[in-house]
Amino acid sequence: MTFGAADPIAATGIQGDLASFAAMGCHGLSVITSILIGDTTRIEDVQVIDADWVADQARVVLEDMPVAAFKVGAIGSIENVSVIAEIISDYPDAPLILDPFLSAMPDQGPEGEDMLIAIRELLIPQTTLFVTSAVEMTRFAETWREPSTGDLIATDAMRLVDMDCEYVLVTGTPGDAHEVGNILFDESGPIRQDTWQRLPGSFSGAGSTLSAAIAAMLASGVDVPTAVYEAQEFTHAALANAHRIGMGKLTPNRYFWADGPEAGPANN
């Protein structure tokens, strides 16, 4: 089950998650937290869904069928953080993949800071795997420490682990300009570091493809370190075969494997 924004171009959010789940062989359930207005260039506006509607969407489905994993994406409001945290707490055996930062969302001002604190206090302690970019991690960390220009990625990740988050995956870590580096942390520190060739172009939905693929594999019983690596492989292939469906950013092709041998490097 994924909680997130409805994206009209299906690059990210609910539609992107459902495509990734299906590509990984899972049936996805969705709870919409907000409705986006936008295209491949930018998100112009957001309509947040009332927290009671968010809760009702989830509760009705959860009373009808079992859920093997939860993914939480863009949440929309502090009230939504609260109701989602309450719902998740009723299913402690199901892994939670938390990927709440959609960088293209309009700035929420002071309320955005309060929402980060709510995420930290209510969702982080229930999280199996927190997925965040290095840039987003720095912003999130400033809810508990003073701003710094130093490289505090490892320190910040371990602080989240101390808050009872089991694993933290930080993407886009500093390194070679021609590569993308991702680091996975657990209570013992960094447990895997992967680098991938940086692909040309600007993409919409890369991060959500990664977190959704991880969620699907955890739902299938794969352990976290293996799921993280295999989801990175899947995401890199989806980006290598991305579509230009509009005049803006490229959209990941989650069904690259169905395109035949001519699909390119992703099939190798």
Image (tube, rainbow, N blue to C red):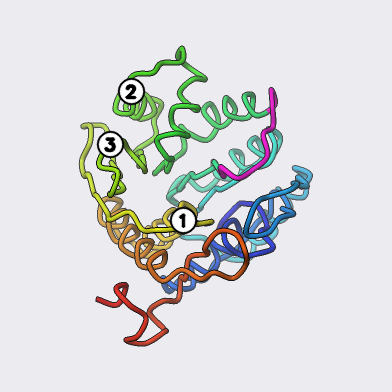
Question: Is the N terminus in the top left, top right, bottom left or bottom right quadrant?
Answer: bottom right
Residue depicted at x 30% and y 35%: 174
Q: How far apart, in angstroms, are the residues tagged by discs 3 and 2?
A: 16 Å
Q: Which mark is residue 40?
A: none
Magenta segment's dominant SS is loop
Residue depicted at x 39% and y 44%: 129
Q: Position of residue 87 (x, y in %)?
A: 61, 45
Please report whichever mark, 3 or 1, sits nearer to the chain's N-terminal start: 3
**Of labels 3 and 1, the one closer to you:** 1
Is 194 placed left or right of 235 in the picture?
A: left
Judge the density around disc 3: few (<14), some (14-19), many (≥20) Cα neighbours within 10 Å.
many
Question: Is the C terminus in the top left, top right, bottom left or bottom right quadrant?
Answer: bottom left
Picture quadrant where residue 265 is located: bottom left
Q: Position of residue 126 (x, y in %)?
A: 47, 37
Using the image as rendered, state which of residue 38 and residue 55 is in the foreground: 38
Task: Give yes or no for residue 110 being in the magenta stretch.
Answer: yes
Q: Position of residue 224 (x, y in %)?
A: 30, 51
Please report whichever mark, 1 or 2, sits nearer to the chain's N-terminal start: 2
Q: Secondary structure at mark 3?
A: strand
Q: Which residue is label 2 attached to?
A: 152
Is 129 placed left or right of 98 in the picture?
A: left
Residues in magenta, as a range: 102-111
Q: Amino acid at mark 2?
A: Leu
Q: Which residue is label 3 attached to?
A: 186
Q: Which residue is label 1 attached to?
A: 206
